[in-house]
Structure formats: C-alpha cells, structure tokens
Image (cartoon, helix red, strand yellow):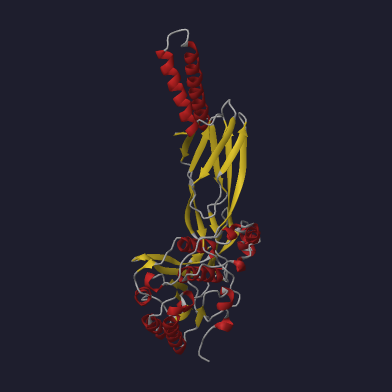
C-alpha cells in the first residue's frame, strides 16, 4: 500500500480534529467530533474502495503461440473483468515481461460492474532467446486519490524466439550422396523411393501409402513401408567458443518499434532483417538457415556445439519439421560461453564419421589448428565445407589489420586443402554470401 501526499493531509486533519474534540468541552467540541467522523469515514471508505477494486478483478492472459522467430511477431490477448458490484474508476496493469519491446501495460478507465475489457498486443521479435511473459502488477486507488494499492498477480508463461532462417537458393555445395549405395535398414514414416515391405492399414496412415494391388488381392487396405534413402548425413558444427567471438548485441531502438517496421514483419519479409553486429549472432543465423535449407530438401541433419563451458549441445541426425524445431530450440538459447577450441571439438566428435559424411563448419576462429583438424577429416573421406565469419568486419579499425591477416591465412589454407569455403562479413546478405558463385575453391 502506498499512502499518497494528500492522504497525509487528511490524516493530519483527522488527528487534529480528534485532539481538539477531546480537549474542548461541549458544545464547542461537537463540530470537531463531526470533522473527526467525516475525515475518519473518508479514510476508511477510500481504503475499502481501493482494496475492493483490486480484489474484485479477474485477469486472463492468453498467448497465441509459445514459439516465434526473429523478424516475426508474437501475439497476446488480455481480458480484465470487474466481478464486483462497484464500478472501477481506473485500473493500471503493469506487465513485467522480459521480451524486448513487449508493451502490454494498460490503464483502464471507468469499468462498470460485471463488465470486461479485452485487447490484443502484437510484438515484433527482435531478439532470440527464451523470455518470460509476465508477471503482472495491478494498481488501483480510490476516487479521492488518497490510497494507491497494488496486487502482484503471478500470471506468467514463457515464449521461445527462434533465430532467423533465411532462404539460401544459391547454396549448393558438393555434399555426400552415397549414390548407388544400399538403403539404410531403418524404417521411416517418410515416403521415399525405397519400399521395404507392406502391412495392414492402421488409422492415421496416409492414403498415398496404400498399395492398391495388394489391397485388391487381399480385400483389405494394405499400405507400403519405406526405408531411408541412401544419402549421407550432414553434421553442422557451430563454433561458440567465447574467445573467438567479436562484436556485441544491440538493443532494439525506438525506430525499430515504428509502424513501418511492424508492417514489414507482417509481410514476413525476412530479407530485411538486420542481424546484430556480432559474430555470435551471425553464426547462429547461418547455422539455422543451413539446417532449414537441408531439411527442406529431405536431408538428414544433425548439429553439435559447445555453447556453455564444457557442456555439449547435441542433436542426432534426423529429418523433417520436428528436427528443424529441435535445432532451432537449441539455437534460440545458445550463447558463446564455450571454452573448448574448435580443433578439439572436431577431433572428438568426428571419430565415428563414415566416408561421404558431410561436416559443415561455421566459425569465426582464426586459429589454424582447426584447419589442420578439418584437413585430417578430408583425408578420411569426410566431405567438409567451411563458413568463415570474418571477424575483421566486426571490430574497430585499430584491430582490423591483424584480423584480416589471420582470416586470410585461414581461408588460404582451407582453399589449398580443396575445402569449399564461404566468407561472410558484417552487413553481407546471407543469401548472397552463401551463394555458390561466392564459394572459394581451387580452380
């Protein structure tokens, strides 16, 4: 409870009136007793009114989706209902959400008894991560402005904002195909060109899996079972070692919250998304885009990264939308806090890689040791592709020369080892930087 300045004046008048009423003899004391009752009743009535405003109130909060993505928006619906017999002159709802730019707080005037107010809040997502929506603090007072009461409402949930994924139509490097190999002896719910057997239809099977000849012969519905295509796995290695990261993450500016930006998001125009000037954010956006690129083409994709000290983040190879959601969930909360060099990660994680497996490495490291580890993978028959984020473009001019020399040496060594290499600099559109025409290879 917060007692306002004017309430202290009323309390002082009540106290003085009470003192004089007890000190003065009747009938002179009658007027002071009247003032005492008047101001005492005013204080009690004001406090009860403010208290009932908060406790005859129901708030409903509903989030349209617990998942969103950078460059898109999230939507919440709020309902405040007056469940009491008295009108509420004003109510203030303050939202304590962590999502940047989420402006859900409201001030409501004149809410009649047993009536409700509702509104929707659409917020553009500028930052990936896991954010709490809520809790809520409700403020209200009395008509005379004597008391300001608050009520904490633990009405909260979480939302996960995925990193942006951009289309990479020009990205078509040589990757492992295992052409002409045997099908993997593993059943799959995907429809492939490899039919393994047939079985009886069960509810939920797609009609395009029905084998009509067997159905006609047996007189009951028969469906086909498939095996995975003979294509090699693709592994994404995301380097989140803290030591090799450059740049910083910026907070959204007021200009980012303007109406034109909001309308741009409604058009889902992902090409207009401005990534933060940080090698960490570029690496995560690139990895997310590459995962979507290959999964959309029905490739089997896995991911490995060491994002938190020595903690290993691992997604086993799989296909489909569920795998993409799993990888994006990992990338949404990943931060460059690792302390294991990329060379050690490659040496430890690729021991059991088979020939023609593809290792796609995303890093801003200028350490030549990881190039040596990658070259060793190539000699074992593992196909390697490197996406090097140039740290020189993310630092101030005083440090640019040193980073440029180190990056140039890493790229030269990769190209000399016949490893397709893509160089991404700050401000480069990813769909252009990861175009096949910009790949650096040995002619």
Q: Is residue 301 above or below residue 12?
A: below
Q: Nearer the viewer, residue 113 or 254?
A: 254
Quarter holding residue 431: bottom right
Q: Nearer the viewer, residue 34 or 365?
A: 34
Furthest toward the top, the residue is 27
Horizontal side of residue 173 vs 376, given as left or right? right
Residue 351 coordinates in the image, percent (x, y)? 36, 76
Quadrant (top left, top right, bottom left, bottom right) of the N terminus: top left
Q: How many marks?
A: 0
Q: Is residue 21 above or below residue 244?
A: above
Q: Is residue 280 above or below residue 415?
A: above
Residue 18 coordinates in the image, percent (x, y)? 43, 18
Residue 223 coordinates in the image, percent (x, y)? 58, 61
Q: Nearer the viewer, residue 355 or 272?
A: 272
Task: Using the rendered image of the protein, determine whether residue 164 is visible from the camera's viewpoint.
Answer: yes
Residue 149 coordinates in the image, percent (x, y)? 48, 34
Residue at 43% over, 63% down: 334
Horizontal side of residue 19 vs 123, given as left or right? left
Furthest toward the bottom, the residue is 443
Task: Using the rendered image of the protein, determine whether residue 299 is visible from the camera's viewpoint.
Answer: no
């Amino acid at each position: 409870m917060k007692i306002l300045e004017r309430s202290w004046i009323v309390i002082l008048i009540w106290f003085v009136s009470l003192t004089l009423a007890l000190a003065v003899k009747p009938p002179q004391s009658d007027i002071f007793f009247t003032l005492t009752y008047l101001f005492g009743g005013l204080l009690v009535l004001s406090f009860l009114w403010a208290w009932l405003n908060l406790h005859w109130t129901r708030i409903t909060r509903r989030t349209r989706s617990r998942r969103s993505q950078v460059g898109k928006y999230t939507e919440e619906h709020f309902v405040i209902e007056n469940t009491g017999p008295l009108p509420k002159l004003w109510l203030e709802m303050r939202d304590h959400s962590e999502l940047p730019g989420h402006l859900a707080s409201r001030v409501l005037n004149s809410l009649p008894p047993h009536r409700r107010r509702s509104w929707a809040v659409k917020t553009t997502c500028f930052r990936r991560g896991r954010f709490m929506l809520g809790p809520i603090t409700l403020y209200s007072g009395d008509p005379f402005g004597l008391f300001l009461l608050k009520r904490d409402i633990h009405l909260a949930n979480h939302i996960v904002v995925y990193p942006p994924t951009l289309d990479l139509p020009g990205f078509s490097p040589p990757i492992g195909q295992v052409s002409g190999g045997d099908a993997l002896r593993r059943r799959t719910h995907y429809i492939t060109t490899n039919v393994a057997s047939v079985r009886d239809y069960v509810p939920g099977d797609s009609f395009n899996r029905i084998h009509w000849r067997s159905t006609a012969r047996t007189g009951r519905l028969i469906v086909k079972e498939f095996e995975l295509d003979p294509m090699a796995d693709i592994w994404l290695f995301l380097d989140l070692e803290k030591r090799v990261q450059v740049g910083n993450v910026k907070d959204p500016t007021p200009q980012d919250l303007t109406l034109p930006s909001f309308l741009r998001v409604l058009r889902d125009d992902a090409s207009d998304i401005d990534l933060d000037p940080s090698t960490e954010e570029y690496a995560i956006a690139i990895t997310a885009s590459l995962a979507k690129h290959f999964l959309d083409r029905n490739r089997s994709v896995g991911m490995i990264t060491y994002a938190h000290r020595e903690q290993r983040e691992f997604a086993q190879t799989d296909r489909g939308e569920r795998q993409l959601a799993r990888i994006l969930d990992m990338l949404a909360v990943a931060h460059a806090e690792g302390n294991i060099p990329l060379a050690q990660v490659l040496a430890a994680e690729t021991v059991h890689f088979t020939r023609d497996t593809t290792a796609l490495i995303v890093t801003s490291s200028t350490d030549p040791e990881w190039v040596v580890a990658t070259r060793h993978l190539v000699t074992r028959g593992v196909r390697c592709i490197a996406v090097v984020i140039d740290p020189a473009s993310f630092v101030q001019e005083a440090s640019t020369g040193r980073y440029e020399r180190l990056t140039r040496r890493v790229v030269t060594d990769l190209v000399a080892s016949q490893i397709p290499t893509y160089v991404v600099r700050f401000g480069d559109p990813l769909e252009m930087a990861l175009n096949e025409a910009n790949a650096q290879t040995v002619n």
